[in-house]
Image (spheres, rainbow, N blue to C red):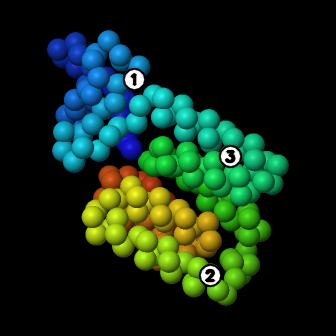
Amino acid sequence: MIRLCPRPDASGTRGVWPVTWRESVPRHHAASVRLEYAFGGVALMSSADASKAQTFFQYGNEAALKSNFDYAIEMYQRACKLAPENLLYRQALRGTERKKFQNDPSKVGRLVGARLQPIRLKMRGPKSKQNWSQVLEICEEAFVLHPWDVTTAREAADAAEHLGHDLLAQWLLESVAA
């Protein structure tokens, strides 16, 4: 989902520039309006989704402070699922995944490649159907097992680029190089 801030246009109606959009509910339900791109049908984030994502992020922060990394990762993943373009959520998720391994790539383990293989196979279907948001979610599953995996980072960056999240794509590649 992509969140774009509405702005008034010349006709006095609300719109998002330069993307054309349509409302799926009447204008008097402005708080629950879901916007969609005219091309591709990609839904934009509603204020309710943004609020849920922020709540999940806060729960993740609280859990990470208590060193409950598994729960923190789950909450951050939920926030990222609702707001895939939010770089802050992904950075917190990746940082927590790395803390789980004491920020040491050598603690990942030797058999991680065998554990990543089913996840990479699971990624083929959505990738062939060009369901890039699902590819990004599956990559996050792989990052839980190996936060420094370069192949997964390339796949995630490719998906982010197809979704139009260029800054996220750049960060995904840089995060494994550091």
Quick check: 58 above or below 162? above
Residue 57, percent from left and from top: 62, 42
Q: Secondary structure at mark 2?
A: helix
Residue of label 3 = 60
| 124 lies left or right of 110 | left
SS assignment at label 1: helix
In the depicted structure, whether residue 142 falls above or below residue 88: below
Whether residue 160 appears in this view of the structure is no
Image side of residue 9 versus residue 6, left or right: left
Crowding near the residue tagged with mark 3, few <14, some 14–19, many ≥20 C-alpha atoms within 10 Å: many
The residue carrying mark 1 is: 32
Upstream in the sequence, badge 1 or badge 3? 1
Q: CA distance from mark 3 to mark 2?
A: 25 Å
Q: Amino acid at mark 3?
A: Gly
Percent from the top left, x then y, of residue 117? Answer: 50, 81
Q: Which mark is residue 70?
A: none
Which amino acid is tagged 1?
Ser
Q: Where, by quadrant of the figure, is residue 148 drawn?
A: bottom right
